[in-house]
Image (tube, helix red, strand yellow):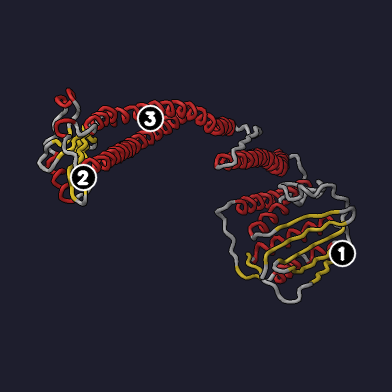
Amino acid sequence: MKKITIRLIQQFVGLLLIFATMSALFFGILFAKQTEDLHQEEMTHRSELISATLSDYFTNGSRTGQKGGGGGYGAFLRFINQIAGENVWVLDSKMNTIINYHHEDSINQESPPDEAKSIMAKTFASKQTQVTKKRNLFQLQELTIATPILSEGSVKGVVLMYSKVDAIHKNQLSGYFMLLISLLGAVILASILAWRLSKRFVRPIETMRNYAGELTKENYHEKLSIQTKDELQELGDQLTLLSQRLAEAKSARERKEQSEKDFLSQISHELRTPVMVIKSSLEAMNDGYLSSAEETEYLQQLLKESTNLERLVNDLLELSRLQSTEFQLQKELVNPLDCINDALRSYRIVFSDKEQSVQLINQLTQPKMIDGDYMRITQVIKILLDNANKYSPEKSVIRLVISNEEETLNISLSNQLLAPIPDTDHLFDSFHRQHQNYKNGTGLGLSIAKQVIRRHHGQITAEADEEHFTIKIFLPSF
């Protein structure tokens, strides 16, 4: 996370420096213009005041200002020059000085700049104040203002003010320096805050990284708590959900691995029994220790065991195919009553041997069809009938009910029990049998039935009390 923290700080400080540079640039331009405008406004105001003051001088007809200073006006101009820092002249149309400074200061008075001739001519012509500026790139270097002295509607002279704006530059440099100090302090303070904010921002990411590391170690019991109320919290919630799903997947994988181990163990046990019987019988016959009657009996036992072995292998293959995702059923529109009737016909003799009867109750008000595999649905009904025949007493009644509820077809088969069933949760597990004295079963029938119903997007459940056992099938219909 150090790299992210450093990158965040670098980007934040970089953006801050760009912002500070742009702010300084805009501030410099605006500050310089504002300072120039204020200086120009101030000089114009002074020039207009001098012009208004000198208009009385020309109105009263005093013409002594060229040599004696104009009755105190020369001292006034000298005072303005000293206080304001600008050069001030009172000139006529021929650029001659109308009012000089007093005494010895008059010899130190500077001459008007040559560039002032054009602005003087414009002022005499327009009778309005004129302003000229001289710049070096974007910086103001010189400022000249010419204000007419009006008397009785005519221009008697012009107040010419000239400034090299040195004071402005000093003020601007002082302002720039203060701005630079302020920006530098802001950058330092912002960098510290950026470091703290970056650490705070990265902290939940660091937590999630450590949590993801625990997930790679299959440690799904750690808790993740991100309380940022933003996208990071949403990501943390997704990681928590992922942890739960991985824990469930791990548990399912472990159950599947254990189930596969148990399944292989059960297969080995189920196959070992008929194989051992066949082997021992063949050894006895091969050694010649059996009489003709015993040999006939052994042959019958061998035929029976081979039949059971064949049935077990076929059921294993059937279950394996149904569990494979590549195996496809041959679905079509099927009337479930046809499947039930076919199955009942196949087991008519089997039920008659135990004097059992099957009561078919059709509660359908109109024919219902299902999208299914006719042979597989018939196979499921046969499996249920076979179990009912084996695990119910003689002369008992087996009830087979077919009904529907909205878009679901319900098939229910119930029978009496020879003995109570303590647990129905594992009835659909492979090789699960309630009574081990029934050797003609493989224990795979209900497992096959469950896979067939699952392939039809349905459900199959089992219920039992002390006297009755009920299997229910739910299939989508239309």
Q: Position of residue 225 (x, y in %)?
A: 63, 35
Q: Identify which residue, 197 or 3, lies in the foreground.
A: 197
- Give the mark nearer the N terminus: 3 vs 1: 3
Q: Dot 1: within a 10 Å radius of its alpha carbon, few (fewer than 14), some, or many (20 or more) residues? A: some
- Helix, strand or loop for disc 1: strand
Q: Position of residue 149 (x, y in %)?
A: 21, 44
- The type of residue carrying mark 3 is Leu
Residue named by callout 2:
148
Q: Position of residue 46 (x, y in %)?
A: 29, 38
- The type of residue carrying mark 2 is Pro
346 up-or-down from 242: above or below: below
In the picture, the disc for residue 179 is 3
Q: CA distance from mark 2 to mark 1?
A: 132 Å
Left or right of 127 in this view: 252? right
Q: Position of residue 2 (x, y in %)?
A: 47, 26
- The type of residue carrying mark 1 is Val
Judged from this view, the residue extending furthest toward the top is: 104
Q: CA distance from mark 3 to mark 1?
A: 102 Å
Q: Identify which residue, 36 or 373, lies in the foreground.
A: 36
Residue 292 visible in the snapshot: no
- Helix, strand or loop for disc 3: helix
Judged from this view, the residue extending furthest toward the bottom is: 366
Q: How many marks?
A: 3
131 up-or-down from 1: above or below: below
- Give the mark nearer the N terminus: 3 vs 2: 2
- Give the mark nearer the N terminus: 2 vs 1: 2
In the picture, the disc for residue 397 is 1
259 up-or-down from 199: above or below: below
Looking at the image, do the residues carrying marks 3 and 2 touch, with CB atoms under 8 Å apart?
no
Which image quarter holds the C terminus?
Answer: bottom right
